[in-house]
Image: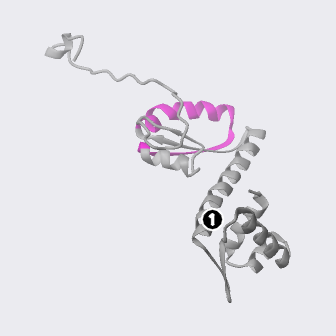
Amino acid sequence: MNLHHLEIFYTVAESGSITACAERLHISQPAISRQLKEFEQRIGVVLFERLPRGMRLTQAGEVLREYAARLFEIARAAEVSVRELADARQGHLAIGASNTVGTYILPSLLARFRRTHPAVRISMFVGNTEQVAQGVADLRFMLGFIEGPLHGRDLRVHRFLDDEIVPVASADHPLSGRRRL
């Protein structure tokens, strides 16, 4: 699949017409029409219904538009990330964190990061595991830090810290002398 053809398809789908697409991409209308037809022939599917006034996506066109939207969003995010890596001393770091991590663990780590990277703007969302995972999946956060398990997500998970939770009781309490609860 040719990304240039996909861009033309997506721009026509979003703008609603070949004329608007041609203006937005600075390409002639006949060239847009020709490339759109080539794209449909190459993938073997009609993507638009040609109507007297404009074009309407077919069912296949709707499916492809959704994939194209995600692909171009990922491309934009990749471009931003690469630019920020080129100069790691500036940019924006968007982080999502579940409640305990965002409240008790990350603040000191981010303060240390900020001392070494003062021009980096940091934003942090604190919510539950599901909200953070969804934010990472939607590319609203570059990183997410969670405590709970993920189910059915296409996200890469790496262990960051092992947190030990221990019971605390008065020395006089009957449970305080037990080795196991």
Label 1, residues with CA under 10 Å away: few <14, some 14-19, many ≥20: many
Compare residues 123 and 57 and report the one nearer the observer.
57
Q: Residue at x 70, y 52 (%)?
A: 75
- Picture layout, residue 34 above or below residue 98: below
- Magenta region: which residues? 100-129
Q: Residue at x 45, y 43 (%)?
A: 152
Q: Note whether residue 94 is visible.
A: yes
- Picture layout, residue 53 above or below residue 173: below
Q: Residue at x 78, y 40 (%)?
A: 86
Side of 174 where 10 appears, left or right: right
Q: Note whether residue 87 is visible.
A: no
- Picture layout, residue 77 above or below residue 107: below
Q: Residue at x 67, y 50 (%)?
A: 77
Specify the quadrant of the image occupied by residue 164.
top left
Q: Secondary structure at mark 1?
A: helix
Percent position (x, y) of residue 111?
58, 33
Q: What predominant SS class does the magenta segment belong to? A: helix
Check disc 1 and report the residue beneath it. 65
Q: Is residue 122 magenta?
A: yes
Percent position (x, y) of residue 85?
74, 39
**Quarter of the rendering occupied by the C terminus:** top left
**Quarter of the rendering occupied by the N terminus:** bottom right
Compare residues 122 and 31 and report the one nearer the observer.
31
